[in-house]
Image: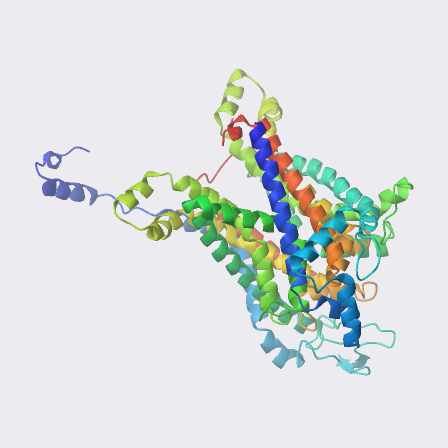
């Protein structure tokens, strides 16, 4: 596209020429915008992202449900002789043979009751709130710490790197569940300092710590590669300090890796919390969580399988939605969008 | 090459040491061990006796040294339950071994099948179906899946027994008791591994050596078998080694508890519930050993298979 203006004779003239040449070109679209467009076209991922949002909203509305619809709290146990009127018939909440009422599909005991007479539906929503809260907080802990330490280790190398990687290896040497149980039990029985098992924060911290190496290693690997590139040298020439280089140059380049990890860690965090609560090392009774509900329900499997099925299905739905949405995000951020076996 | 191996093993040993020290400190830091052992309604005199008997009043590094020495001479007795931990672990190991290896082989074979199919038919219906199946697989917590299997296949249809582990002396019973646990554990890993394999195969499909193979005149099937699949299996094998290491160390605890297989996982779980320090230490050492050794072996295998990695 050589034009007469290209033969300008001074810098400022050349600058003007360049700009006016560029004026007829359409504005560029950055990689994030492109990724967002690709994501929007992925109907399946969007659908499941929506499903997850609906679940979150439902769980956040737990107090509303408990107050206005079911008229009972998540931990209020029905008395031994409590009865409930369903469609004209009066039935005991927990029968004499210790069989709790099954799903009534009415406003009271919509999904039935558990062995202590608590409303399963109400517990489901409150438990969901706990499980999701813990999952989100844990994910934030993991991502912030892992990215920070990973960038530090990858950039400085040397002593920082050695200490951080060894620490990550030590955490990594434990299977996630066992580490979670150990930390969880430690918090539940005695606590360390001010952190106790009755706080929901404790399981969140436990789950958060467990997954740090999972994110730290890839981030560090990427920073190791990036720091050899010319733009880092250029930044240093410009006089940027180490900290500025790390956060203004390296961090944005690691951003797409981070974005891909977030749904993955969230899904795994929710699953781990459920597992820990199931084993008694996470959320402590009487507080509900999907994991504790399943564990309590298993003791009544033959007669009231709904108490296992209902929280379990919610759990699977939530995790699956996050996974599918996360997969969509990963596909959207991948520049080689449509890949086929080469022919 | 030798230096690489020695360096890896040395790092492994260091990590193991750190793991044992940290675990010991963590467990010792939680409140008063003697008070816990004495139980409720214990008098101060009783607590004092227990402290002297087990040496809780000695400095922490002396306690650590004594514990490690007991463990390695086979004399590790649990405080709470007065059994010899080493014997107990040896007793429980066959269950965990059977579960881990059985499931490991099953999921490896099925993942390769699913992953390859999904990659070859990428973008088409088969791929989409398999992707959804994988997603579901990774989203089911093993205790929920196990409960479903137990209820529908065990309780209602009575096809499988409900719990317990039978030793290899009765092969058919051993098998019947393990089918559901194997299925439960495998589904989780199949979901993950088949997707990893699928994306690795697709990544490799664009490489130059694949184009060369096609140019030489090999059919698609031959290219897949002789070149693409072999290279794509490398990350799969390394992941498999790592996961097996974790399983052998007790990571299958969720599956073991649901099905009542008295394996190392359940032992670990009970020990942690009781804060039984000795047992936890032994199992932690076992796990860390399994994981760290297997990961070192996998790293070495990696370097053997891929010359580019040796130079890193």
Q: Residue at x 34, y 51 (%)?
A: A248
Between B237 and A92, the residue placed more toward the observer is B237
How many numbered marks are there? 0
Q: Quadrant of residue B8?
A: top right
Against A10, residue A152 (above or below) is: below
Q: Residue furthest top?
A: B216
Q: Residue at x 75, y 52 (%)?
A: B265
Residue A110: x %, y % from top left: 70, 73
Q: Is residue A330 left or right of residue B166?
A: left
Residue A84: x %, y % from top left: 76, 81
Residue B51: x %, y % from top left: 75, 66
Between B83 and A307, the residue placed more toward the observer is B83
Q: In the rendered image, which quarter contains the N terminus of chain B?
A: top right
> What colour scheme was applied to this rendering of the protein?
rainbow
Q: Residue furthest right?
A: B170
Q: Can residue B31 be seen?
A: yes
Between A4 and B278, the residue placed more toward the observer is B278
Q: Residue at x 63, y 57 (%)?
A: A271
Against A116, residue A144 (above or below) is: above
Residue B200: x %, y % from top left: 56, 35
Q: Is residue A197 left or right of residue B181?
A: left
Q: Can residue B254 be seen?
A: no
Against B227, residue A141 (above or below) is: below
Between A216 and A70, the residue placed more toward the observer is A216
């Amino acid at each position: 596209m050589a034009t007469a203006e290209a033969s300008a004779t001074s810098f400022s003239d050349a600058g003007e020429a360049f700009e006016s040449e560029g004026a007829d070109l359409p504005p560029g679209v950055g990689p994030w915008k492109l990724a967002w467009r690709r994501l929007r076209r992925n109907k399946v991922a969007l659908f499941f992202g929506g499903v997850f949002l609906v679940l979150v909203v439902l769980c956040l509305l737990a107090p509303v449900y408990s107050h206005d619809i079911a008229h009972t709290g998540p931990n209020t146990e029905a008395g031994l002789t409590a009865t409930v009127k369903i469609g004209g018939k009066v039935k005991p909440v927990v029968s004499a043979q210790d069989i709790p009422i099954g799903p009534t599909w009415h406003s009271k005991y919509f999904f039935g009751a558990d062995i202590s007479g608590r409303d399963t539906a109400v517990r489901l929503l409150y438990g969901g709130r706990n499980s999701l809260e813990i999952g989100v907080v844990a994910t934030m802990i993991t991502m912030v710490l892992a990215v920070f330490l990973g960038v530090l280790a990858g950039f400085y190398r040397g002593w920082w790197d050695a200490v951080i990687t060894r620490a990550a290896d030590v955490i990594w040497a434990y299977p996630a569940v066992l580490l979670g149980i150990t930390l969880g039990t430690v918090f539940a029985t005695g606590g360390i300092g001010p952190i106790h098992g009755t706080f929901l924060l404790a399981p969140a911290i436990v789950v958060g710590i467990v997954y740090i190496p999972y994110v730290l290693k890839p981030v560090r690997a990427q920073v190791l590669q990036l720091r050899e590139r010319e733009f880092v040298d250029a930044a240093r020439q410009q006089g940027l300090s180490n900290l500025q280089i790390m956060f203004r140059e390296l961090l944005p380049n690691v951003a797409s890796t981070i974005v891909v990890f977030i749904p993955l860690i969230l899904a795994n965090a929710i699953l781990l919390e459920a597992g820990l609560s199931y084993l008694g090392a996470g959320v402590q009774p009487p507080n509900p969580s999907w994991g504790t509900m399943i564990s309590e329900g298993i003791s009544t499997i033959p007669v009231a399988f709904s108490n296992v099925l209902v929280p379990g299905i919610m759990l699977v739905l939530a995790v699956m939605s996050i996974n599918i949405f996360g997969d969509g995000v990963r596909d959207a951020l991948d520049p080689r969008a449509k890949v086929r076996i080469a022919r | 090459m030798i230096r690489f191996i020695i360096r890896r093993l040395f790092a492994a040993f260091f990590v193991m040491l750190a793991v044992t020290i940290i675990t010991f400190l963590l467990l010792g830091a939680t409140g008063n061990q003697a008070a816990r052992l004495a139980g409720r309604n214990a008098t101060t005199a009783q607590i004092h006796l227990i402290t002297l008997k087990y040496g809780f009043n000695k400095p922490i590094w002396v306690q650590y040294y004594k514990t490690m020495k007991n463990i390695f001479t086979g004399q590790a007795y649990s405080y709470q339950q007065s059994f010899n931990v080493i014997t107990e672990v040896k007793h429980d190991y066959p269950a965990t071994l059977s579960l881990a290896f059985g499931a490991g082989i099953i999921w490896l074979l099925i993942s390769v099948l699913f992953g390859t199919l999904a990659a070859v038919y990428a973008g088409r219906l088969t791929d989409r179906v398999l992707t959804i199946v994988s997603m579901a697989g990774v989203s089911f917590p093993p205790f929920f899946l196990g409960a479903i299997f137990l209820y529908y296949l065990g309780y209602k249809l009575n096809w499988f027994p409900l719990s317990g582990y039978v030793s290899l002396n009765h092969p058919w019973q051993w098998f019947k008791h393990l089918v559901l646990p194997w299925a439960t554990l495998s589904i989780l890993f199949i979901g993950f591994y088949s997707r990893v394999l699928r994306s690795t195969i697709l990544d490799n499909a664009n490489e130059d050596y694949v184009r060369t193979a096609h140019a030489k005149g090999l059919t698609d099937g031959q290219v897949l078998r002789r070149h693409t699949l072999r290279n794509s299996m490398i990350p799969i094998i390394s992941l498999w080694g790592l996961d097996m290491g974790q399983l052998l160390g007790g990571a299958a605890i969720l599956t073991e508890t649901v099905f009542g297989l008295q394996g190392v996982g359940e032992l670990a779980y009970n020990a942690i519930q009781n804060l039984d320090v000795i047992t936890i230490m032994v199992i932690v050492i076992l796990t860390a050993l399994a994981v760290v050794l297997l990961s070192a072996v996998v790293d070495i295998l990696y370097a053997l298979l891929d010359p580019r990695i040796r130079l890193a």
